[in-house]
Amino acid sequence: MNPEYQRLFDLAQRQRDRPPCGRYAPSPSGPLHLGNARTAMLAWLQARLNGGRFIMRMEDLDRARVRPGSARQIVDDLRWIGLDWDEGPDVGGGTGPYEQSARDGIYAMALSRLCNSRRLFACYCSRKDIRQAASAPHGRDGPIYPGTCRERGSDDDTQRGRSAALRYRVSAGQIRVEDVVAGPIVQDLSRDVGDFVVRRADGVFAYQLAVVVDDALMGVTDVVRGVDLCESTPRQVALFRALNLPTPRYWHVSLMVDEEGKRMSKRDGSASVMEFRARGGKPAKLVGQFAASLGLCPPDTAVSVQELLRTHDLSSFTHALRAAD
Ligand code: GLU
């Protein structure tokens, strides 16, 4: 195994007392919509109010979903809002590379560690197989894996020639995460999720594995992200523990809603930062809108992210996030 990756893992495992560090990890699958820009601003504010480093990481593992030019546009939009970062795809840094597509060797090393601890098994089930399994109840995030391949011995060659996904064998028992904003997140993975995929049958590493390895190896202490990722967090905590890596604190923040109170998402073509800019919108107006949505400033205020830094501290900021939850 690559000695450099070995060194990175060993370093991360030893660093329990790490200086504060936040990150924003967009998927370059289209224009940055306003809700995502708001989450990025909150992640940045949290890190800076905490006196920490801030990292930008492109989550471009799923090549089929990547849109050409999107990563560059996202970086440009975030800079236009006024955010800056100490490490990232456009500025480099000591814990890169900062595109997940360039980190396959690092994820492979994490997989081999899990494999050594007999936590992984090959799974030949298609989505359809899983849906059709008579006993597959529905979990928090789709059907619960019915365990079809879990007990298949390695000498079972009935599936020879088919490519296999790798699943992580979950343990029974509750995982409890104390989220700074959302409060306790409690799941029993064996009941609520089932054994989950860490590498897909087409060889692509799963988000759940990549995000854990990256957050740990980049020294991230605080993960600020949308509340829609709450459900993924216990899976990630299980992987941090299995890899003996330090678990960050989580801040799951409410998502921005449109005028009708509906959650904004890329799919329904919600307004993007690019469109806002094209209509002649100014950064201070957008930042003011984001800040006002959390009561960090009165409605219709123009404000820069630097002014928000000057006028708040970590405790008033945390309070505002909790009140908006
Ligand atoms: N890349 C994910 C997204 O854009 C975010 C992952 C995370 O923050 O953990 O939804």
Image (tube, rainbow, N blue to C red):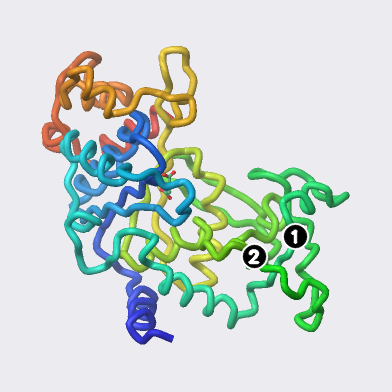
Q: Position of residue 67 (x, y in %)?
A: 39, 43
Front-lying residue, 149 or 28 = 28
Q: Residue at x 45, y 70 (%)?
A: 107
Ligand 1 lies under 8 Å from the Cβ of mark 1: no
Front-lying residue, 164 or 281 = 164
Q: Is residue 278 visible?
A: yes
Quadrant in the picture for the N terminus? bottom left
Task: Determine the image quadrant of residue 125.
Answer: bottom right
Q: What amino acid type should be assigned to the residue bearing mark 2? A: Ala
Compared to residue 281, the image places residue 78 above or below, namely below
Residue 125 is marked as 1
| Label 2 to label 1: alpha-carbon separation | 8 Å
Q: Residue at x 79, y 46 (%)?
A: 137
Ligand 1 lies under 8 Å from the Cβ of mark 2: no
Q: Residue at x 47, y 17 (%)?
A: 261
Residue 24 is marked as none
Q: What is the secondary structure assignment of the residue under circle 2?
A: strand
Q: Is residue 314 visible?
A: no
Q: What is the secondary structure assignment of the residue under circle 1?
A: loop
Instruction: Report the number of discs.
Output: 2
Residue 165 is marked as 2
Please report contact status of discs 2 and 1: CB closer than 8 Å, yes or no. Answer: yes
Front-lying residue, 187 or 213 = 213
Quadrant in the picture for the C terminus? top left
Task: Determine the image quadrant of residue 292.
Answer: top left
Q: Position of residue 55 (x, y in %)?
A: 26, 54
Q: Position of residue 246 (x, y in %)?
A: 41, 67
Front-lying residue, 73 or 153 = 73
Compared to residue 20, the image places residue 270 above or below, namely above
Q: What amino acid type should be assigned to the residue bearing mark 1? A: Cys
- First in sequence: mark 2 or mark 1? 1
